[in-house]
Amino acid sequence: MMLPEHLTVAGGRLHIGGHDTVALADTHGTPLYVTDEDRIRANYRRLEDALTAHYPKVRVLYAAKANGNLAVFRILADLGAGADVFSAGELCLALAAGMQAEKLLFNGSSKSTADLALAVETGVKVSVDSLDELRQLNAAAAAAGKTVRIAFRVNPAIEVPTHPKIATGLATTKFGIPAGQILDAYREALACSNIDPVGVHCHIGSQILEVEPFVREMEVLIDLARDLLALGVTIEFIDIGGGLGVPYHRETDRAPTPQDYAAAVMPVFLAGIRDLGIEPELWVEPGRSLIADSTILLTRVNSVKEAYKTFANVDAGFNLLVRPAMYDSYHAVVAANKADAPAEREYTIAGPICETGDLLAKDRMLPALAAGDLIAVLDTGAYGFAMSSQYNSRPRCAEVIVRGDDAALMRRAEDVDDLTAPMQQPAWQQ
Ligand SMILES: *Cc1c(COP(=O)(O)O)cnc(C)c1O
């Protein structure tokens, strides 16, 4: 298998950022997520460089939901990123990691009164998803004597070649304001006493492996910007969201590079703004493409069973990595302690959860496996731990981060006390 450069094999063992995965598993136990900080930094710089080579006023907003560990937020804050936050929790983590409020965009199709109050209080920009929300936000801002800077999220009605559960720009999705209503929405925003519309926002979906949908998205946004200028809106930013895919099928997927993405999208943007006579910031909201490949999930083989198939039963399941069960996602797997042994047999990697669908990988050719062997599931940095649960009363595992020669926990493993801590005993049971 073609491994990315931060994953290497030495002495028959898989290494991440130069660290022996067998030693990491022995030290910290399994299951274990391991993240390479330098890989995140390299991914970020590659994207930023590709975009700023075309236009200097680019702002990268990390899509916070992809990986919610504060250590990851701090890396991105250090690189100068802002964040696209989708909840009060993500907003608070981004601020705690040192991101300035003015670099945050509070997104979401169903914000509560408390969410809107927090947005007003912290001074972040808001991506407004409905007229109802606009009116509530204006009232909250008026009550606080403040003005909130907003964009509307526009639904561009663009079909994208990805899994239907992660296509967000279809006309039928719950996200955004339909194109036919968007000008009226901006008109109303202009008339609101405590709202200042300053941008446009769009996000068409995730794990998109072609550039063409982003080009069409940019065309929609430029056309919208033209209409908004005519309405009298000042356009300070155009936000094209995230969604660039990664090559999970390491043998066969062709993912556009950041350079490919920039080369496709930037000419449309540049020609558009030149034509309109404006110089707004360009905002992008990458999640997956920044961190998916930075992280592996290490999981130990508990037993091997010859049945309908040969199952390698491991200690991580969809409690820790739900993508295969939820989206039929493919993740490459490596026998981490036998990384240069020849592939001999076909295995299905099955988790410990009491569900038929708890399979991390199906029908993979691997070296002969036995109890105690270590499996690495690759490309698990995005929507991996972030979507974990305690289902089956399984405490969540630890997360380790490596940088250069250093390795450290960025989250300790939970134990049974962490399961019971928030639970309360009703008086009548005492
Ligand atoms: C999830 C999300 C992103 C990030 O998507 P990726 O595919 O991880 O790049 C960006 N913007 C918004 C609004 C999102 O909901």
Image: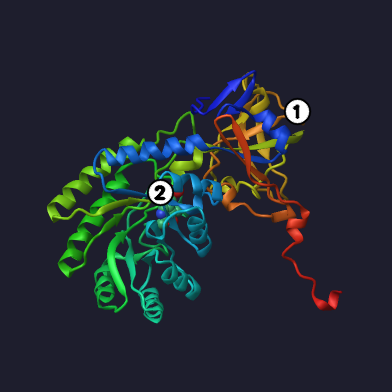
Q: What colour scheme has been applied to the protein in the rendered image? A: rainbow
Q: What element carries label 2?
A: loop
Res. 11 visible in picture: yes
**Residue 363: x %, y % from top left:** 61, 33
Question: Which residue is drawn at the image coordinates 67% and 33% (left, top)?
Answer: 24
Res. 312 visible in picture: no
- Against 134, residue 64 (above or below) is above
Q: Does the beta carbon at disc 2 come under 8 Å from ligand 1?
A: no
Residue placed under numbered mark 1 in the picture? 370
Question: Which residue is drawn at the image coordinates 32% and 42% (left, top)?
Answer: 211
Question: Nearest the camera: 374 or 194?
Answer: 194
- Label 1 sits on what residue type? Ala
Question: Relative to residue 250, is residue 239 drawn left or right?
Answer: left
Q: Residue 81 carries which label?
A: 2
Could you tell me how far apart the alpha carbons at marks 1 and 2 are, in whole angstroms?
44 Å
- Label 2 sits on what residue type? Ala
**CB of mark 1 within 8 Å of CB of mark 2?**
no
**Residue 159: x %, y % from top left:** 35, 52
Question: Which residue is drawn at the image coordinates 38% and 56% (left, top)?
Answer: 103
Crowding at mark 1 (Cα within 10 Å: few <14, some 14-19, many 20+): some
Q: In which quarter of the image is the C terminus?
A: bottom right
**Circle nearer the N terminus (1, 2):** 2
